[in-house]
């Protein structure tokens, strides 16, 4: 089983759910920048206060801020990890490559969760998170297309990308993932 994984895909594709399941099963660190940012917002920390309005609009918080979070976690952690929601744009992907080179680590596989836009919107609307109103959802999908989707090409060129059909039940998708992350 691969030990250093990255989940890529649009909001609503089920990255968080699947990343959590897989990380728990394999004993990997699940590093979700969205979860960590929401925890900062909840705690009312200076970092959370800076991120809150940006997140509510469905835009990306600054690269420097998320990079500091990811660096702090990866530097402290021994063993495997699964990144979820990071990187979100090319500068973040390049910064991650540099950080991993520093730590003498490398990404072993990128899992791209693919799902039809209409299904994504339905899933997000039923989730009911603070940034899950229809306008914000549409904006998050545009941000994904413009800023995050170019990473597909970036990782495909490195021979790291595996595409996963993200429709069906949680169990079905988990089985599909389990079948492709073996060494
Ligand atoms: P998520 O839970 O991954 O959907 O993230 C929720 C929100 O947190 C996003 O819409 C962004 O505002 C912010 N966010 C999460 N991860 C990142 C990241 N890597 N870069 C910038 N913003 C992020």
Image (spheres, grey):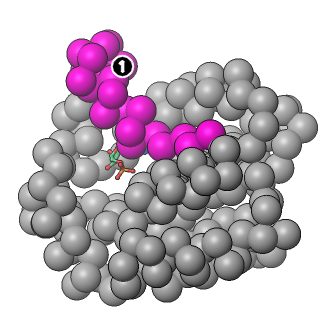
Which residue was labeled with disc 1? 47
* The quadrant where residue 71 appears: top right
Residue 81, position as x, y percentages in the image:
68, 44
* Residue at 30 percent of width and 49 percent of height: 59
Ligand 1: does it lie within 8 Å of the C-beta at label 1?
no
Outermost residue toward the right in this view: 104
Q: Is residue 159 visible?
A: yes
The answer to if 39 sits in the magenta stretch is yes
* Residue at 33 percent of width and 23 percent of height: 40
The answer to if 135 sits in the magenta stretch is no
Which secondary structure lies at badge 1? helix
Residue 173 in the image: above or below residue 57: below
Which is more toward the observer, 17 or 10? Answer: 17
Q: Callout 1: few (<14), some (14-19), or many (20+) C-alpha neighbours within 10 Å?
A: some
Residue 2 in the image: above or below residue 76: below
Highlighted range, magenta: 29-51
Q: In the image, 16: left or right of 81? A: left
């Amino acid at each position: 089983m691969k030990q250093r994984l990255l989940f890529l895909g649009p909001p609503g594709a089920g990255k968080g759910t699947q990343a959590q399941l897989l990380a728990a099963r394999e004993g990997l660190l699940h590093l979700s920048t969205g979860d960590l940012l929401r925890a900062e917002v909840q705690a009312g920390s200076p970092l959370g206060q800076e991120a809150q309005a940006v997140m509510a609009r469905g835009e990306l918080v600054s690269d420097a801020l998320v990079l500091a979070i990811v660096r702090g976690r990866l530097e402290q952690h021994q063993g495997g990890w699964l990144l979820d929601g990071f990187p979100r744009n090319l500068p973040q992907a390049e910064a991650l490559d540099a950080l991993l080179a520093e730590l003498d680590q490398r990404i072993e596989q990128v899992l791209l969760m693919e799902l039809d836009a209409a299904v994504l919107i339905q899933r997000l609307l039923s989730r009911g998170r603070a940034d899950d109103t229809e306008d914000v959802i549409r904006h998050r999908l545009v941000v994904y297309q413009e800023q995050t989707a170019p990473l597909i090409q970036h990782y495909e060129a490195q021979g790291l990308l595996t595409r996963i059909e993200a429709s069906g039940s949680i169990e079905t998708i988990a089985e599909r993932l389990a079948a492709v992350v073996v060494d």
